[in-house]
Image (tube, helix red, strand yellow):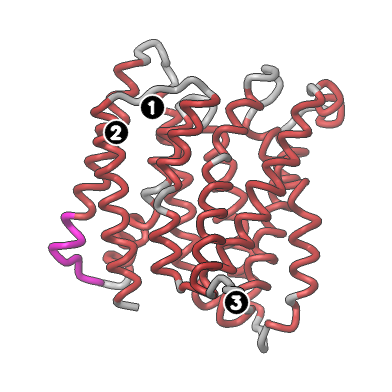
Amino acid sequence: MKTYPSSSQIGALFAIGAAFLFSTKAIFIKQAYALSPLVDGTVLVALRMASALPFFLVIAWLSRHQKKQLQPLDWLILWATGLLGYYFSSWLDFMGLMFISASLERIILFLYPTLTVLASSVLFKQRLTPKMLIALLLSYGGTVIVMLQEQANSPHNENFWLGASLVFASAVCFAAYLLMTPRLIRQFGSWHFNALALTIACLGTLVHFFVATTQPLQLLAQLPTQTFYYGLILGFFVTVLPTIFMALSIQRLGPAQSAMIASIGPILTIILATLFLGEYMNAMQWLGCALNIMGVLMITLGKKSTT
């Protein structure tokens, strides 16, 4: 008698697939940067979003029936969230990766759930429990350990703190995006909202590229051919597919269990960075990484259990 995977098992596979694909992002970005000095964050994020745009347009069209009666304010907030959460946040992240390791970038970005908790405590007067305070101490303490160790191992990297700051700012933007999404998901539907928000982000990124770049078409013509391959990989395999996989996982498992599985992301990035980029983390950095993941998981799971 044949046995078929249960819905929860399929959901777990989707979450693992999403975590793995998301974890490859920094690896591909670093490899693309190594191709040519012409490849910077603005160029690469534009190639990524240009590759992803057709897929999100299709998803937006297919899911258009999900939306409810909409007000002009809904569309205004939608544009704000799309530009903040996926355009500006992505650009800051790509720029930061020009100056810090892929491993550290992933660990800093993983802080975004802690930022939503801190923002909620200020904006909505939500009290921080002792458990939350311990989780914040673990996550930020662990991140600081990793940062200080990397900075000590690369004392001649004058732009280290700039890179770390840019990636942290990216996490702040994404946390702000998450705080703005609940109303929009109710109004637009989850699939339609995500597709529209990412479409807006793609458009914003492309406008940024053509405005900020001197002679953009000539620049594109001078890029190595491999750069465009990386743009396609980042657009489809690192943006479109994991976004779909995570949505399918949440449908089957719920956000808490999907978040728990996604917590393997930083570890996967570190392993991939070791294998493909020659990065190295010492014992203290691994300890910091473990503390970061432990703290973020405490916050993520605690927050989901109370909503």
Measuring 31% from the left and 75% from the top, which residue is drawn there? 305
**Residue that extends furthest to the bottom in the rendered view of this protein:** 69
Question: Which residue, given by chain and number where applicable, does mark 3 sit on?
Answer: 1
**Quadrant where the C terminus lies?**
bottom left
Q: Which mark is residue 286?
A: 2
- Nearer the observer: mark 1 or 3; the answer is 3
The x and y percentages for residue 25 are 58, 40
Neighbour tally class for label 1: few under 14, some 14-19, many 20 plus, Cα within 10 Å: some
Which comes before the other along the chain, label 1 or label 2?
1
Query: Is residue 238 covered in magenta?
Result: no
Which comes before the other along the chain, label 2 or label 3?
3
Secondary structure under badge 1?
helix
Please determine whether, in this image, residue 204 is positioned above or below residue 270: below
Q: Nearer the viewer, residue 170 or 243?
A: 243
- The quadrant in which residue 40 appears is top right
Q: Mark 3: which amino acid?
A: Met
Question: Which residue, given by chain and number where applicable, does mark 1 sit on?
Answer: 161
Measuring 33% from the left and 68% from the top, which residue is drawn there? 123
Q: Nearer the viewer, residue 134 or 246?
A: 246
- The quadrant in which residue 228 appears is top right
Which comes before the other along the chain, label 1 or label 3?
3
Secondary structure under badge 2?
helix
Q: Badges 1 and 2: C-beta atoms under 8 Å apart?
A: no
Between the C-alphas of marks 1 and 2, the distance is: 20 Å
Q: Mark 1: which amino acid?
A: Trp
- Nearer the observer: mark 1 or 2; the answer is 2
Magenta segment range?
126-134
- Nearer the observer: mark 2 or 3; the answer is 3
Between the C-alphas of marks 1 and 3, the distance is: 59 Å
The x and y percentages for residue 1 are 60, 77
